[in-house]
Amino acid sequence: MNEPNYLLDIASWHTRSSGFRAIPSICSAHPFVIEAAMRHALKTGSPLLIEATCNQVNQEGGYTGMTPADFRRFTEQIAARTGFPMKDLILGGDHLGPNPWKSLPADEAMDKACDMIRAYAAAGFTKLHLDASMGCLGEPIALADELTASRASRLAAAAENALDGLEGIKPVYIIGTEVPIPGGAMEELDILEVTKPEAVLRTVDIHAQAFEAAGVESAFARVIGVVVQPGVEFGNHNVIPYAPEKARALSESLDHLPNFVFEAHSTDYQTREALRQLVLDGFAILKVGPGLTFALREALYGLDQIAGFLFPEVRGTTLVATTERVMIEQPSHWDKYYHGNPAEQHLQRHYSYSDRIRYYWPEAEIAKAVSDLLAVFDGQVIPETLVSQHLRALYPGVRAGRIQPTAQGLIIGAIELVLDDYFEACVS
């Protein structure tokens, strides 16, 4: 017998008298981020949703070098180390569709996208975001709603076929694409247009028709959410905060969709109160990724400075110098996103909200520089006065005994400060 999907009834969570009314979605493949998320979920006694994107993880390896099965093993290893029970881990796939292959003709790109989603389903990912909105070779950048829905239904059929006859948890699906492409916004942001209520209702209706035409009505019964734009986003230098009054009509449209919630992407850097208000307004899935690796980078750079003071002769070069050199030599992950003069680009490479440095942590030279930095602190308790100087946000936690003043303790603590806003916002 198939087990029920934990997220299947998420639309009713807002009626709970206590407990989680919503769930954070941790969108990262960095081991420190995943470890911090597991440790935080253990403290709160909550399930944990971790998602990989089509560009990070796919049947060809993605930029992490991992297939969906690899990513599952990767999370299992971290769970074993932290003591996190796998039964409480929900794996999701984000923007699953032809985006990694959109330079190919549509038929070829969709064949690869179907192979990808089959691999996700077979590896036990039980939350799947269907995103076939982008044009492929010779097509417009954005496709008509009907074609998008038709391709989404084809993806759902591929996932369902991969699980045909198998026991286990059936996946839930997310539809809708009112967000930037995977990887984030391409330019500075000023204002955003909130999704119109009529567009949401049309999206759901067109997808229902497409799923029926494709013979996967049973899969549509497990569509639990729609990705919409509530008016939150971040650029390289700025964050657009949530304005509830601008999203009121959008939020009220859920009255006509009793089995649906909204999924909010790019909620990074919102305040805890803004996140809480998003939850109250029906955005029951809050995705965060760059905000977590931004905190990771802050911790690593702070440790880099502390190591330079305590152990000035140990390393040949700093972590900051190594990342700068590698990013200059291999600009493909940032040069289309960071504009301006050389000084402005230098600032963005290291300190942009978009945090495109996150793509470089797996690079061999940078990974070694991080390893060398952590080795310098092996067995060392870091003086709290230096934590105050270089990682001030962590100082109160160190003084109170909540954060261990070791290199790894400070890294995990920095990420958990961000996670705490999300988990607190999701609790009724």
Image (spheres, rainbow, N blue to C red):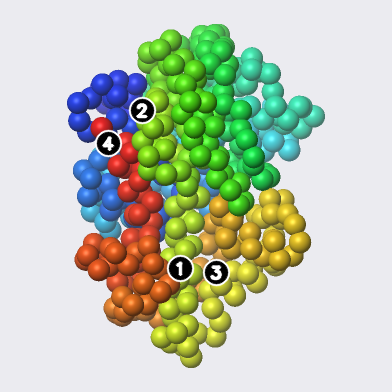
The residue beneath circle 4 is 427
**Mark 2 and mark 4: span between their CA atoms?**
10 Å
- Kind of residue at disc 3: Ile
Which of the labelled discs sits on residue 366, or is there none?
3
Which residue matches tag 1?
300
Q: Which residue is mark 2?
A: 280
Label 4: element kind: loop
Q: How much space separates mark 3 and mark 1, taking CA atoms?
A: 12 Å
Local SS, label 3: helix
Indicate the quadrant containing the C terminus: top left, top right, bottom left or bottom right. top left
Mark in front: 1 vs 2: 2
Q: Residue type at mark 2: give it.
A: Leu
Furthest-bottom residue in this view: 313
Q: Nearer the viewer, mark 1 or mark 4?
A: 4
Sooner in the amino-acid sequence: mark 1 or mark 4: 1
- The mark that comes first in sequence, 2 or 4, is 2
The answer to whether mark 4 and mark 3 are in CB contact below 8 A is: no
Q: Residue at (36%, 72%) from the top-left corner?
A: 388
Identify the residue at image location x=31%, y=42%.
423
Circle 2 or circle 3, nearest the eye: 2
Please, is residue 229 above or below residue 359 in the view? above
Is the residue 64 above or below the residue 11 in the image? Answer: below
Q: Amino acid at mark 1?
A: Leu
